Amino acid sequence: MLFSKILLAYDGSKASNQALERAIELAKVTPGSSLYVVHAFEFPRFFIGEALAPLPASVNKDYYDLAVQTTDEVKSRLEAEGLNATVELLQGSPAEVILSYAKEHGADVIVIGSRGLGGIREFVLGSVSHNVVQSARIPVLVVK
């Protein structure tokens, strides 16, 4: 099965880098295919009881700078592979952002790592890859 519009969910984790390799392979075996890479991030939120604790602006800036660095790294890797891909940095809930982007751009497949950088949230809310697999209306390739 060949896919013409490939969406890669990328967060810089080990599994995400392995997913990047698979997405590159898929794009190379399908002449004329489009590769879209999405790095979705959320600013951290901390609750004290039921109240949302304000974070210093410097924390959000550091978080944003790391997200920009992650997208810059994936852009360079794709350029080194000779692929012209669309790389986007989007803010929001990662699973929701990935699914929305796939729908808006008519993606044929979503490629995602099995475990990302989610930390403890993964155990509390369910992993991003699990949520994407459960909600996607197109094939999802989960890479370990």
Image (spheres, helix red, strand yellow):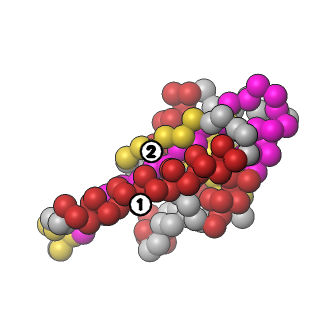
Q: Earlier in the sequence, mark 1 or mark 2?
A: 1
Question: Image point 19% across, 61% down: which residue?
Answer: 57
Let me know if residue 56 appears in the view: yes
Q: Is residue 21 above or below residue 123?
A: above
Horizontal arrangement in the rendering, residue 81 relative to residue 85 (left or right):
right
Q: Amino acid at mark 2?
A: Leu
In terms of secondary structure, where does tag 2 sit? Answer: strand
Label placed on residue 15 = none
The residue at which mark 2 appears reads as 89
Disc ID at residue 66: 1
Closest to the observer, 116 or 14: 14
Q: Which residues are magenta?
A: 22-46
Seen at 37% across and 48% down, the residue is 92
x and y percent of residue 3 in the render? 76, 33
Check if residue 38 falls in the magenta segment.
Answer: yes
Count neighbours of disc 2 (C-alpha within 10 A) and say few if under 14, some if 14 to 19, many if 20 or more.
some
- Give percent across and percent down for residue 101: 51, 35
